[in-house]
């Protein structure tokens, strides 16, 4: 088959999130099919296609992400009928390039990566004379993510403005996502909970769950560090709202409970820290690193990896990375949604500040006494990831779905 992928950011280098997923999808599909790529470029990306992509894809084209000033986004959030996600990456140059590629190539399938790219998916679906089948790879059930954000922010008066924004976007996303899910030929979700949520919108559109995976050989476990004070580590893109919420909740509600018993260091490793996180900078032994070349050394340097997520969805690559590194993990239930781990066997799960702090302290005491339980949890987590979330075990499901649709 000849497959065209439409991605919201360049899949290379594959450092985090959607880029990692898209890169491995491209590599896998290119081993059996001819793969083309049309992608949005960030301000940091070179205009010329990266050799890492041209080695995989027979054709690569990219256009800069459009600039949308904050005032324009705020106005659109109030007046536009479409949700913000549908406006974020739309530009005429990308539409023109897609039209040209559709005219020049005979594609068997077009795969749309994420709801931001839905305007281009609609363009293929509405092509004169009919276009190829369109697969929607939904990186999140976006309407559900915004619903959770609205309900979470509504609990705090100082976040009511954000709750109002999320409430408005939730309603717009519900109708827009529903329309797109019913228009495409197939939907891929990144977790079973997301698949169920999207199926509720999709009508008769076929759906399948193909979770995020991991290249297990890249993550070599290392012994637990003997640093003092021990490090608690979180990794992720730090202007992403669920990550910001997670760290504010942990830093302001959980960390003081831990420090009433033991000194610890908190490291938050990830690009573009949001200004809301400035409240944490003044706390002792808290480091916001900003962008890092590789998060794995930070995971290896942790006594405990944290996943205190209260908003969001999907299968979180950060959790899979920490599990592959055999690190002891403390997570909320939402942090491991879509990953069928068991509390006390693969990691510890806690959902309120006191129980989360107690779980962290129990592992720190264990490590001070030799670390047998921490090592056991880490070993079980790595084994679990290797069995269930290695890319070579996951991606054949995508092949079967493509064959069904094309």
Image (tube, helix red, strand yellow):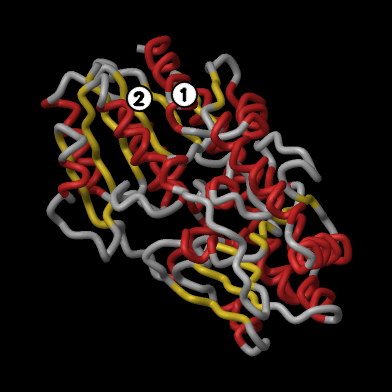
Disc with the residue nearer the chain's start (2 vs 1): 2
Q: Which residue is depicted at the point 15% across and 35% down?
A: 59
Q: Are marks 2 and 1 in contact (CB under 8 Å)?
A: yes
Figure check: 17 above or below 231: above
Image quadrant in which you'd find residue 243:
bottom right
From this viewpoint, which residue is outermost toward the right? 354
Q: Quadrant of the N terminus?
A: top left
- The residue identified by callout 1 is 183
Pointer 2: residues within 10 angstroms few (<14), some, or many (20+)?
Answer: many
Q: Residue lying farthest front?
A: 370
Q: Which residue is drawn at 40% across and 13% down?
A: 405
Is residue 388 shown above or below 204? below
Closer-to-camera residue (296/117): 296
Q: What element carries label 1?
A: helix
Spot occupied by residue 206 in the image (x, y as percentages of width and height) = 53, 16
Mark yes or no: residue 74 visible: no
Looking at the picture, how far across and down is residue 32, in whole percent? 26, 19
Residue for badge 2: 125
SS for tag 2? Answer: helix
In this picture, is 73 found above or below 2?
below
Front position in the image: 345 or 140: 345
């Amino acid at each position: 088959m000849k497959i065209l992928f439409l991605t919201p950011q360049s899949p290379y280098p594959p450092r985090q999130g959607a880029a990692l997923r898209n890169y491995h999808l491209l590599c896998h599909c290119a081993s059996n099919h001819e793969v083309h790529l049309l992608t949005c470029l960030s301000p940091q990306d070179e205009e010329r296609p990266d050799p890492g992509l041209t080695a995989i894809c027979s054709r690569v084209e990219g256009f800069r992400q459009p600039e949308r000033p904050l005032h324009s986004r705020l106005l659109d959030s109030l007046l536009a009928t479409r949700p913000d996600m549908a406006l974020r990456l739309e530009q005429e140059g990308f539409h023109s390039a897609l039209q040209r590629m559709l005219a020049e190539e005979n594609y068997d399938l077009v795969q749309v990566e994420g709801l931001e790219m839905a305007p281009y998916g609609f363009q293929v679906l509405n092509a004169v004379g009919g276009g190829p089948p369109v697969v929607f790879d939904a990186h999140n059930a976006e309407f559900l993510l915004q619903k959770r954000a609205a309900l979470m922010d509504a609990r705090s008066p100082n976040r009511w403005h954000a709750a109002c924004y999320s409430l408005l976007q939730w309603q717009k996303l519900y109708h827009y996502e529903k329309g797109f899910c019913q228009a495409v030929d197939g939907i891929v979700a990144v977790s079973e909970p997301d698949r169920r949520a999207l199926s509720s919108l999709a009508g008769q559109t076929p759906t399948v769950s193909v979770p995020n995976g991991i290249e297990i050989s890249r993550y070599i476990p290392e012994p637990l560090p003997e640093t003092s004070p021990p490090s608690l580590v979180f990794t992720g893109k730090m202007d992403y709202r669920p990550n910001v919420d997670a760290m504010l909740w942990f830093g302001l509600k959980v960390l003081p409970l831990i420090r009433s018993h033991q000194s610890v260091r908190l490291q938050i490793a990830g690009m573009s820290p949001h200004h809301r996180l400035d409240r944490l900078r003044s706390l002792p032994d808290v480091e916001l690193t900003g962008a890092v070349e590789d998060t794995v050394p930070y995971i290896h340097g942790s006594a405990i990896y944290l996943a205190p997520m209260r908003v969001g969805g999907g299968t979180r690559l950060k959790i899979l990375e920490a599990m592959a590194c055999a690190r002891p993990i403390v997570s909320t239930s939402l942090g491991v949604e879509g990953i069928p781990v068991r509390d006390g066997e693969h990691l510890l799960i806690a959902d309120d500040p006191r129980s989360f702090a107690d779980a962290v302290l129990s592992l720190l005491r264990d490590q001070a006494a030799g670390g047998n339980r921490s090592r056991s949890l880490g070993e079980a987590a790595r084994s679990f990831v290797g069995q269930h979330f290695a890319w070579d075990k996951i991606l054949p499901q995508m092949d079967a779905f493509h064959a069904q649709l094309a």
